[in-house]
Image (tube, rainbow, N blue to C red):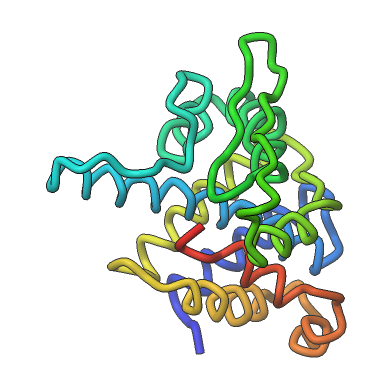
């Protein structure tokens, strides 16, 4: 059972989102899952860059290497002005993850138009197909820049407290089930809702993989 400081931080995230106008707990969980996934992509990229620096070997990257592509990384935008963070996530990062293919995010032109990744049906994997299917109807629903900034700060604090070292995708999934489920704003059986919500667990597992 999660208690103490971690529980208080989880509760605060829930309270901030609830106060911001999102009152459906499953919608909250979906939005938090998307943000955790966005963060995990940058963590994976940082690991890749560290390996490159140590080995001298060039590695495949998730994010476009353009200034716009690099600006989509969690570590790059998380300390920006809340309005800038909101614009980056709503106009760049979220559309990009909805169109992610083969472990790569699409780039954008200076005018803000997405440069779609070319389809390669011969090399499409079952994981690519499942991910695209789950994300096809995904929507970014965080209501305001201020709420988003509070969530980002709260998630960073949680990761620092709860995961002192690198953690697996299974741990992240368990963390979602347990941590979000202890929120005091939930007054119905969350486990049952996870089972009944079509594709919820499968979608979370698809989103929180570490080897996209």
Asked where in the image residue 202 lies, by quadrant, the reply is bottom right
- Compared with 153, 79 (above or below) is above
Closer to us: 143 or 102? 102
Residue shown at 48%/36% (left/top)? Answer: 63
Question: Residue 132 appears at what percent x and percent y?
Answer: 74, 55
**In the image as oriented, which residue stretches furthest toward the front?**
122
Name the side, left or right, on which 105 lies relative to 168: right
Asked where in the image residue 160 lies, by quadrant, the reply is bottom left
Residue shown at 15%/40% (left/top)? Answer: 56
Closer to us: 157 or 116? 116
Question: Residue 6 appears at what percent x and percent y?
Answer: 46, 71
Closer to us: 163 or 154? 163
Closer to us: 86 or 115? 115
Residue shown at 69%/30% (left/top)? Answer: 116
Residue shown at 79%/40% (left/top)? Answer: 143
Question: Residue 102 appears at what percent x and percent y?
Answer: 57, 50
- Compared with 37, 114 (above or below) is above
Name the side, left or right, on which 25 lies relative to 75: right
- Compared with 116, 187 (above or below) is below
- Compared with 125, 53 (above or below) is above
Question: Residue 193 appears at what percent x and percent y?
Answer: 83, 82
């Amino acid at each position: 059972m999660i208690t103490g400081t971690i529980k208080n931080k989880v509760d605060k995230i829930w309270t901030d989102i609830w106060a911001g106008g999102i009152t459906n707990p499953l919608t909250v969980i979906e939005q938090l899952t998307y943000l955790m996934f966005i963060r995990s992509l940058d963590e994976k990229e940082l690991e890749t860059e560290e390996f490159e620096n140590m080995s001298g070997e060039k590695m495949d990257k998730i994010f476009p290497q353009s200034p716009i592509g690099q600006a989509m990384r969690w570590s790059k935008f998380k300390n920006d002005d809340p309005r800038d963070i909101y614009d980056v996530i709503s106009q760049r990062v979220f559309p990009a993850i909805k169109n992610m293919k083969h472990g790569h995010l699409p780039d954008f032109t200076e005018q803000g138009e997405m440069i779609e990744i070319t389809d390669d049906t011969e090399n499409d994997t079952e994981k690519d197909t499942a991910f695209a299917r789950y994300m096809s109807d995904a929507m970014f629903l965080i209501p305001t820049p201020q709420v988003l900034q509070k969530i980002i700060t709260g998630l960073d604090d949680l990761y620092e407290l709860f995961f002192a070292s690198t953690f697996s995708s299974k741990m992240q999934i368990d963390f979602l089930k347990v941590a979000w489920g202890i929120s005091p704003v939930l007054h119905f059986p969350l486990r049952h809702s996870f089972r009944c919500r079509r594709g919820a667990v499968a979608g979370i597992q698809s989103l929180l993989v570490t080897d996209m």
